[in-house]
Structures are given as structure tokens and as C-alpha cells.
Image: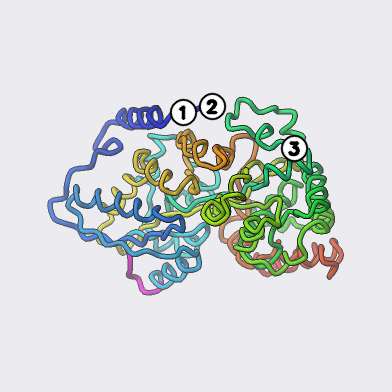
Amino acid sequence: MGKVTRREFVKGMVAGGAAVAGTLAAPGVLRKAYAQKPKLSVGLWNHWVPGATDVHKAIIEEWAKKNKVEVSIDLIGPQCRDILTIISAEARAGTGHDITAICTFDATAHKEKLEPLNDVADYIQKKYGKFDDISTYLSYQDGVWITVPAPTGSHSYPLVSRIDLFLQHVGINLRELFPTDFTKRDKSKVDAWNYDAFLDACKKLHKAGYPFGAAISETSDANDWLCPVFLAFGSYPVDEEGNITIESDATLQALEFLKELTQYMPKEIYGWDDASNNRWIISGKGGCISNPPSAWAVAKRTRPDIAAQLWHHDMPKGPKGRYRGALYFNFGVWKWSKEKKAAKELLMYLLESAQQWRILEAAQGYDMPQLKPLHAHPVWEEVGPPKGTQYNYIPRGDEKLIVGGYPAKPEYAVQIYSKYIIPVMTAKATTGEMSPKEAMKWCAKELEMVIG
């Protein structure tokens, strides 16, 4: 896809939306005001990027004012555990916000108490095409959209690497390998960016004193980079039918790879939390991490010299493909809401391109939309320094986004993810506590308790 200017993007999106006829309005055109003034409460994710929440609130308040809706907004988070605490309490009490932010798998446990949002999802998909596979996997269960993908908070975990260190010590020009124009990629060179090449790069970075750093501990980030590695080798814990599939040659191959890779990583990774890899790259000690643009955004404020050298790009390719971790945020509406009509219309409005445009720009490219047309937003090639650092934050090539625990049914995947079964198995095998085969068998027993 060629480059798109801001003016062209807005013009195209608004024109596309205006072509949709019926009672539902085009982007930026508010629906008929209500006869009586509804009261609508929203539990909104508190975005960690400064200023992004203010823009999101302003969009909601503008809609409410023009539609004569009284709206109250409570900020929750930014940690997902804060959101989980709120929605769990509301689910038990049967009262709370009309609309609530929900993290990744957390709707699954409460889907019987959530209002079906098929009409919202159908409306948006008719305008912009289908939501991507992972958002559908998380939100569309048993023929019902139990949630809809949120325009804020959703993110993925590409590699974030030092341009200067890769060029000097690895001999790879990251800006040429993953340029800010997908059509200029050299397919043969990108295909050669596999886990063997990555291991070689990590050896060279380690020798130069700037190792690759990523958590192998009971923390979210560990799931988000390790689960894609296993899938790239063809290993996954549980299949779509609920069969435990971890005991395989593919799992052993992945564990042997990780056992070698960890020899060239910091020893502290087994105690890292979700912020540790950010601190690692920002400190200047690291040459590469797997992370959303959060590390870059902090470095931009605190270590602009480091930020100017960071490039977000594709994960390596394995024998069975190229995978990248993702965590998606969603919106849900409780069945007990007295203002379901207003709640659904607000969600439709928030998911339209004109509103997502403002939100994406305010978040400096951190948020990842689940609608393909929104990938044309120019923010990812404009933000910097260095200009274009986030262009490949949106998967442009053959990467497939996954969440830890995929492709198991969400009710199983959430337990695989939240119990950190894959990171613990990896730690046991790579520290020498167990052999890879013993660690794999340990994992199978843990999964038996999950499946029941």
C-alpha cells in the first residue's frame, strides 16, 4: 500500500462512511436526539499515553451533548488487573457502568451477563470490513458478539531494536529490511529473517554488550513473546477441540531453541516484570526487546538519544510461520443497563473512522485498530524520532497476530495465559531445573488441570 496523507485518509474514510444508508448515521453525523434525556455511565480505560484519555473523553462528551445524553465517565486502570477487579465486582453485584472497558479474555467469564452486540458489530463491519481474526476470536463466541473491539488500548508485541547496534554489530540495516513503505520490502531478505538469523543476531549483540532482553517469568510480557515463538515452531498447548497438544517434537524444538537463546540474554529475565524490558532498552544496556511502542514513548521523553535509534519491526519466522503476540481491549454493555440503545449508539460512534482517527493520533500510534482500512492511518509513518519508527508496528507482511493460549477455546486460553503455564515451562527448561522433555511433560500435567 502506498503512502496516504492525512487529508486523503480523512476524505476517503468519511466518503466511505457516507455511502451507508439507513437510520445509522455517517461518521461525524450524530443520530437523532432522544426524546427523554438518558443517563449513561462509562467505565473508560485510562490510557497511559499522556493526553490520549482526554481526547477519548472529549469525543464521548461531544456525542453526549449533541444527543442530549447525560454521560458520566470513570477512568479505570491503566493496568488490566484494575479493569478486571471492577468488572468482576459489577458482574457479582448486577449493577455498575452501562458500558465498560474489558481486557482481552476477561469477558469470557461474564458472557451470560453481557448484552449481545451483534447489531453494533454488524454495523461497523458493513462499513469497514470484518474485524481481524483475533478480535473475532475474543469477542465473537457461540454466534454472539459478547463485546466489540475497543478503539483504545489494543496493542501488539513486535521486536523493538536499536538501529545503530544492529548495523554496527549484526550487519543488518533495519530501516532497509523493514522500510516505511511495504512495497519496497525485499521478500527474500525478509524471508531470511528467521529464528536462526535472530539467534545469530542475539549472539552478536551479547558479544558487543547489548543483549536481547525479554521476561521469562510469571508476567504478561512473557506470554506475549514466548507463545508466538512456540507457534512459529508449530507448538501450541491445546487445540480448538480442547485436546492437549503440548507434548510434541515441535515443543521440544522450540524449547531447545530457547535454551540456546537464553545463553545470550540477561540472567535477570527470570525475575522481570512487564516494565523490566522497557527499562532495559531505555537504559542503553539492551539491543533489542519485544514490546509495543511504550518503551519508545518513554524514551522519547527521558532518553531521546535512545528513542532516536529504536525501530519497531517484524518478529522472526519459524518453521511453521511468523507470529506476533497481541493484547486487545474491548467494550461490553451489561444486560442490566437501562440505556442499552444509547450505549450501543455511542459504541457505533466511537468505532467509526472519524473518531478512531482522533484517538489513534492522540495515542501517538500505540493503539492498534482491528479494522484493515484503519491501517492506512498515516500516524505510524509520521511519528518519530526516528520518523517511521512505528510504521511496521502495524503488521505489514506475513505475521499473524495471536494471543497467548490460542487456538484453544477462550475459556481454556484464559487459564493458560493467566497461570503463565508456557513461561514457567520455558523457565524450567532453560534454567536446567528440568530437561526440555521433563518440562514439556510437567506442562501437560498442568494443562490437564486446566481442561479438567
Foreground: 265 or 113? 265
The part of the chain drawn in magenta is 92-97
Foreground: 393 or 92? 393
Image height check: is 279 above or below 371?
A: below
Q: CA distance from mark 2 to mark 1?
A: 9 Å
Residue that mark 3 sits on: 172
Mark 2 or mark 1, whichever is nearer to me: 1
Q: Residue 114 vs residue 139: left or right?
A: left
In terms of sequence position, does the residue under pointer 3 or pointer 2 come before the other? 2
Residue that mark 2 sits on: 1
Q: Residue 449 vs residue 84: left or right?
A: right
Which of the numbered marks, if any, corresponds to residue 4? 1
In terms of secondary structure, where does tag 1 sit? loop
| Neighbours of disc 1 within 10 Å: few (<14), some (14-19), many (20+) | some
In reply to whether residue 95 is colored magenta, the answer given is yes
Q: Residue at 71% of width from left, 49% of height from top?
A: 231
The three-letter code of the residue at mark 3 reads Ile
